[in-house]
Every structure is written in structure tokens, then in C-alpha cells.
Image: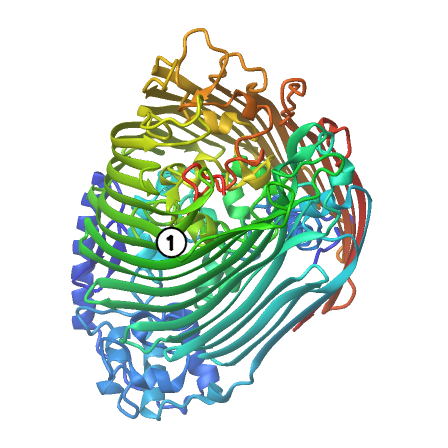
Amino acid sequence: MFKAPQPGMRLRPTAIILVALGMAGAAAAFLVSCSTTPTAVMVPLEIPGAHYVGNQACLDCHAQIVREFPASPHARVHFENAARVGETGCESCHGPGSKHIETGGNAKFIINPGSDPTACFQCHLDVQAEFNLPQHHPVIEGHMSCVQCHDPHGGDVFKPKGGLAMARQNESCAQCHREQTRPFVFEHEALREGCTVCHNPHGSINRKMLVESDPNLCLRCHAQVQQAGSTEIFIGNVDHKGFLQMGTCWTAGCHTAIHGSNVDPLLRY
Amino acid sequence: MREIKKQSDGCTTVNRCSRLTFYVSLVVSASCISLSAAETNSVPLPPPATTHVVFDRDIRPILETSCLRCHGGAKPKSHFRLDDRAAALDGGDDSTEDIVSGHSDRSDLIRYVAGLDKDIHMPPRNSGPPLTPGQISLLRAWIDQGVNWQTTNQPTQLAFTFAPTLRWIEVQGDKAKFRELQGVNDGFSGGAEEFSFIQQTSPTEKFSLSGHVIAPDRDYRLKLAVDEADQGFIHAGFEEWRKYYDDRGGYDPDVVPPELSLNRDLYVDNGRVWVDLGLTLPRWPQIVLGYEYDFKKGTESMLDWGEAGGVNIAPSTKAVDEQTHILKLDITHDFNDWHLEDNARVEFYTENNRGDENNVFYQVSPTPNSGTTHTSDNYHHVQGMNTLMLEKQLRDWWFLSGGLYYSRLEGSDFFSQTNSPNFEGNDPSSWNSDRITLRRQSEIFSLASIFLPLEYLSLSVGTQNEWTRDEGFGGSIPDFEFATNNSASGDYDEFQAAQNADLRFTKIPFTVLFAEGRFEEQSISESEQEGSGQLLDKTDATSDRYNLRAGFNTSPWTWFEWNAQYQRQYSDTDYNHLLDVFMSPFGDPGFVAPSNGYPAFILNRKIQGDGVATKLTLRPAIWLSTTLSYQYTATDYSSKTDPNGYNGVGGPILDGRDNEQTWGLSAMLTPFQRFYFSGAFTYSHSRVVTADNGVPSVVPYRGDIYTFISTAAYALNAKTGLQASYSFSYAGYGQNNAGAGVPLGLDFTRHVLFVGLTRQLTKNLSGALHYEFSQYSEPSSAHLNDFTAHGVFATLVYRWP
């Protein structure tokens, strides 16, 4: 796989880099597959023996995607006349495409971010960090992929793939979390504003991937009724000061049916 | 995609060039047309070669060099394939006489390659050089001699991979926490890290079986695919993975004493099985009929109310049993530049989940937590949904897309709760509902266009209208305040109109400017009822929301790229409470009826957020790339309320304020031969403050998170490589409020070190040996959740050929 340098032999920088990058790719594959811990790493999108061919070549077979792509937020970083030719557009995420085309579209010779988040992490550093927090969706473990929830080519990245339509509320989450997104007799209005009001779907330090682990999460929206000189927290007609000493609004055993209830308008069961 | 012009000479070009280039192109195109015409007129059709044609020697190189790029593989252009004799003789979309065996003079293929057709020229001029007269002569002779194709019966192509693996992990400390965070069990495990069997039986037929099996962690993945190009496919698979939970419900073990630990291995298995049958006949719609079965089964740890060390919070469990059967039918068709896609689904979902917790009403000393409460939902629904999408490139500069979505859900639920013993400490008491009916219906219509009026300008606009109605009701539902069963219902109607616009401008050299906006107007009508007047609530709400974003991306030099953007989000909702009666014993004093109770006391709510983000990428040398990023967001939540029933004044209040900053730095370098390193460091600081009236149990949620992720690789020689990775994360969100409540923050430090050796043992066999060290430390829980783990992994990989 790697050729040892001979005395007096000088490898060209390109060759050196290709060797090192290939090695890094192999290392990353092992790190992700064998490790107990998700350790997805930044690996450049190299395909041995392939070179950049430009977006025009992709159009021949992927016309539908190319037609929709100008509406995608990813098109913001796509421009034909960039100095970094070949690294904007399709190949910036899918890697150099020459061998893919030469082999009639062989999937072995193109990078598919749908099965490996490495391409996405090149730009989304903050998301990569979130996926390395203790509580996260199992994307870097390979049980989920970015494109299950995001459409990288269409008009709205906050939904699974499917044209230029906008995302329906909680559409991505409802694919798996039916218990939480099904209808209830008594609903929690927060779900109308979206699951991400309370959860960070990439990862969090808190259980259930909550954005916060204490009552501040609820108090942001559940307004207090103002009282002059009071040291109580009235939410509606109920003073919650004592309840808030017991824990969070949901873990203290009170509003445990936090996504909705069929029996209790206060979402306690 | 900007402009696709099939020129009169058959050239296909895509231009995103400047105006000057455009005029130059016109001149060149005119010349091209003239030359083409001249060539067509002056160069006669080459005669067939007089020699006996040998396919592998004479024809196959021509096809591979000039044709198969487009007319081979899984999706040949115009459904015309030249990698199979029978398919080639069938012809493509444009002609069934592309190749007429024995008659090269009647074969369209020859006309195209010889430039005799005024519309179609093969290969297209921008896709490769034209065939030489000699090559055309050979093709003519090949057709005249019967389209001999010796490689039709070429040997089957086979690829095989098998990677058995063994691992051993030793954990000291909290093993349940280790399982939850690392996602694997300790001790021995093994299986196949990867296996695959791929057989290409012909250019159009392929069989593949691949997967991954690790036991006893139940980490399985199996995929089967049988593909016959231009006929159909069978794709099937099975996957399952296990999510582990700690045995304290994730709560602070310093507060929840060890004797209340659940002392169980808790996990939920998640999985799915699917099979798709596809029909992919040329010129027919692609039809896929599929079935999918999703499941979740196991037990997870939770927290619930229960006496624990002087506070009312204790670990509990939730038994999860969810099953979903999905039937699906997908139809995709391209015709006359239209693209049609219809996805129909019928979903049968069953949920039999049960919460098991301490009986909060039976906390009798000296045996607190001896009573139990079981709360069950036996829920089932059938949901049918259909999405229809239609798209067309109307003009070179105008792409139109429209969609319809319809969904209807019919469900039922049976709720039950058993308290053992009952409130008085006697025999168990049960609360059971009769059938609870739940319905949801949604209709969505969307229309969107992409306009490319100028070569440097793109505009995407869209509108989407949604209507949703939810209703739920039951004749006999437990009412816990009044210790009886009552009727209850909830109705909810929502209409939402949304519009979006996205503008992209690229006239400034090496730069993209963009701006986008999304606007939503929402109207909601909601009513809830319980019993004969215990709850009567009717509220109308109207919301206006927008989300604006603008920024740029520039890359004037190959070593430099910089982007930045600003974003504003705004939401303003007015509530009109038409009816508001809520009798509850939890109000003070006692029952309040009628009331401005809960939730009908918020009159207005506003959310306003601002954010900036920027990223700078520098590549000062070919061996070094660095990225620096920064994000800042700030969001204010404010409300206006009614006064409460007895001593409140109501009015506006700033409920909460979020702000968060995130810094990122990454580097990728290859400073010398055979060595590669990449690393990414991220630091974030966030702070959430809500109005707390000085209540000491509610403190700001604030802290810092640091993460560092790195990997390095070094090639010792041609056969041996070394790899290492290290990741570190730290969170400091501890809260020192134990005196006033329970500490809800979290401090932890986590290290993971991974070193490995890979070696190519033979041409087909390689091996890998890895060691991993991980350490987790949680000072905020008095280190009771800490663990240290060592793992050794050995993997062999056999690949053939």
C-alpha cells in the first residue's frame, strides 16, 4: 500500500500528501468501526486516483438534484468562479468525481455523506463537537445518518429529502419518535414550535438531549404572573416555588407526560 | 445547470460565464456551426472496414473510451446502453434503430458518430473528441458483420470481504454509566466488523449481500440487494442496535442514594426490517412497493416522584414496546421534462409502554418507596399519507416545483394506572379509561420556483399553506383532581401560511452574497373540556413569525476562504381566551372557578433572537489547512399575562434570556512524508437566565464546554501503519444550590485515547490491533458516576480479489 522511500529518492509533494491522506482515510475507517467510542475524525475527501471534474459532469446523470440545488442553503458556498476550483459545488461534499464517471457511476468511487458524516463535519465543526458529547443521536456510530433528518440538496435542510417544499413541523423527528409526536387529548403547545425548542438533536451534556437540565428550560416560556414584592413564582394561579425545589418540572414527578396527555390537562400522567 | 443549450450543431454547453465570455461564445458558436456544416458537407461517411472485426480488440476500446461514460452503468443516458448486446440492439429513447444489425447504413449510431445528424452528435463535443474515420469504419463493419459481442459471456465478477473481530473491555467504576455513554457492553464481544459478497453476473445484473454483526451488544446490520438494470430490483435489510441507560435515571447519585439504584442492566433495542421491490422498466414510471417494520423494545431509566434522601425525586423505569408496520408505494416518472414523484404510506403503530415508579401517596416510614405505581398506555393508530410532487424546467431560467400532502390518522388509547397499595395503604387501586379516540388530519399545498434571470443571480421563492386538525375525546377518562372518571376532549385547528425567498448574487469576483427570508402567519383555534365544567377552555391564537438571514462567502485566493452571516428570528403570538374555566385543587386558596387559571393566562408571547456566524479557512501551504469559526446567538423570551386569581398584577415580563458563543479551531496537516494529523477544538459558553423572583432553587443555567478531537496516522513502511486518536471533552455546568433545592447542573471530564497498528499480511489479508483507554470523571456527583476503561480490539480483514 505504501512504498518505502529509496535512498536519494524524493517523492513529489502531491504523492506524499496522497499517501498520507489515504493512510488517514484508512485510519479513520478503523477508528470509527473498531472503537467503542465515537471518534469520527476530519479526513479530507480523497478518492485514490480520482480528480475534480466540475459540476457540469454531474448534471449528465443527476439533473434533478442539480436543478433543485440553487434553492439549497448549501448553494451559498457554491460558485463556479471560486479560486478553489473543484472544491466548490458537488465535489466539495462528494469528493473528486472522475473515477465515478469513468466507471459509469460506480458508487465505490464517490463519497456518500449519506452514510458517512465526515464530509458534513468538514464545515460543521460545531455539530461534530455536539455529536461527541455524552448524549447524542448515534450518527458517528453509524446507526443514523445526517440525511435522515436533513436534505442537503433541496430548499430546506430541516427536513428529509424531497424537493423544494418547506419542512413540516417536527417532520424529521416524527419518523422515529411516534410516541412523542402523536396526537393527544391535551397537548403541550411547545410541540407546535418544534422539538428543538427543548432538545438539541445533535447532542448535549444532558439526558434526553435537552438543551438545559433545570427549570429554566420551562420558565423561558411558562410566564410568571407578576406580583409586587413577591418572592414566589406564580404560574397561573399556582405558586411553584416549593415544587421547583424538588427538581425540574418533569423529573420531580409532576409534569411527566411532557409531550402530551390523554387524561390530564396539566400533563402529569 | 444555469443554461443547458442544445445547439443546432448538436453541442451541449453549460455557461455561467461573464457577459464578455458570452459574446465570445457567440462568435465561437457561430464558427462552430460553420465548421460543423462544412465538415458535414465535406467529409463523407467512411466506408465499413474490410477486415474481420474482433470485438475485444477493435470495438470494446472505442466504446470504453467514448461511449460507456454515459451509456453504461446503472442509469444510461436516454436508456441506451452499450455494455450489453441485447440492450444495445433494443435502442434508446430517441430511436429503436440505433443499431440495426447487418445495416450500418441504417443505424442511427453511425449517423451520430459521423456527425450526419443535425441535432445529435456523439460523443457530445464537450464530452470528448469525435471518433476518427478509422474508428467509424470499424463500427460500421462491426454492425454489418452482425454486432459480434464476444464478451457477452464474460466471466462473472466477484468481490468478497470478511472481517472477523474480537474485543475485550475492562471497566472499573460505574459500569452502567460506561454502557450508557460508550454504547457498548464491557467484557468479551465479537463478530464480523464487516462482511460483503458482491457478484456482478452481467453488465446489467448485480447481487450484493453486506453487513455487520457484533454480539452480545446486538449491533446488527444486514443488507441484500439484487439489481437488474432496466428491469427492477429487490432491496432488503435488517438492522438493530442497543441503547443503554444507567440505573439511576441519570440523576445525581449524591442526592439519590445508592440503595435506590435500580440495579438492573437497562437498555432499549431499536431496529427495523425492510424490503423494497422496484420496477425500473425503461420509459415506464419507476414503481417501488415496500414494507418496513420498526421496533423499540426494552426498559429505560427515568426519574419520578419518590422519597429519596429528603427530596421527592427517585429513579424509576419505563418499559418500552413500540411496533410499527409500514406499507409504502413510491412512483417516480420523468416525461417531457416533467418530474413526477408520488409517495404513499400506510402506517400501523402500536405502543404498549408502561411507567413503573414509586407510589408517591404511600411514603410511610420506615419503608419509603415500598409502594409502586404502574401507568400504562395501550395505544394504536393507523395513518395514511400521500405526498405528490411535480417539477418542471419551464425555461432555462425557470424551474417550477409543486407539491400536495395529505395525511389522516385514526387512533385509540386505553390508559390505566395501578397504585399499590392505595392512598390509604390498603389494597391496590386502579384507574382505567374507556376507549380514547384520537384523530389528526393534515393538508399541505406548496409551490416553489427557482429563477435564474441573470448569470450571476438566482432567486428561489416559495409558498406553503398547511391546515391541521387534531381531535381527541373519551367518555370515561380518569380525573385525578376529583377522583372520578369524566368525559374529556381536546380540539385543535391550525392554519399556517408560509412564504420564503432566497437570493444569491455572484457578480463580485470570487464571492457569493446571499439573503433569505421566511415568513409565517399562523392561526390556531383550540378548545379543551373535562367533566361537566371542571375544565372549559377555548383560545384563539394568531402568530406572525419571520426568520431572516444574510451573508457572504468569498475565496479570492486558493489559500483563503471566508464566510459570515447574520440571522434574526422573531415570533409574536396573541392569545384571545374566549372561555376559561378550570377547577383545580392545586390553586390557592382551593378550588377556583371560574378562573384565569392555566394555561389561559398568557395574553401575548414574543421571541426574538439574533445571531452571527463567521468562518475563516486558510491554506498557507499545501500541507496545512486551518479553519477558525465563531458563532454568537442571543434570544429574548417575553410575555404578557393576566393577573392571577388573588394577588397578582400581571402585565409584561421578560421571561428569559439565552446567549451562547461557540469558538472552533481546526487544522489538518501533513508536515512530512507518511504523516497525517487533523484536530478540531471547540469551546462554547452558554447562559440561560429566567425570571426567578429571587427564588434560590432557580439559578442561571450557565457553563462552558470544551471539546478536542484529533487523529494522526503514520506509515512505518509499505505494509505497516500506525494510527492514534485522542478526544477530550469537559463541561462545567455545576450548580451550587443544594441548600435550596436539588443540584441540577453537571460537571464532567472525559478522555478517550486510541492507538492502533494495521499491517498488510498478504495480498488479500490485513490485520489490525488497537487499544483504547477511556476515562470519565463527574465531580458534580461526588465521582460516583466515574469510570475508567481499557479495551483491546483485534480485527482481520480478508478482501478478494
Residue B278 sits in quarter = bottom left
- Chain ID, mark 1: A
Q: Residues within 10 Å of mark 1 (few under 14, many from 20)?
A: some
The amino acid at mark 1 is Lys
Nearer to the camera, A164 or B742: B742
Residue positioned 22% across, 48% down in the render? B448
Residue B520 visible, this orientation:
yes
Nearer to the camera, B523 or B212: B523
x and y percentages locating residue A254 in the rendered image: 53, 35
- Disc 1 marks which residue? A161
x and y percentages locating residue B63 in the rendered image: 40, 75
Residue B509 visible, this orientation:
no
Is residue B675 rendered to the left or right of residue B550?
Answer: right
Quarter the C terminus of chain B occupies: bottom right
Nearer to the camera, B265 or B282: B265
x and y percentages locating residue B155 in the rendered image: 56, 85
x and y percentages locating residue B262 in the rendered image: 72, 45
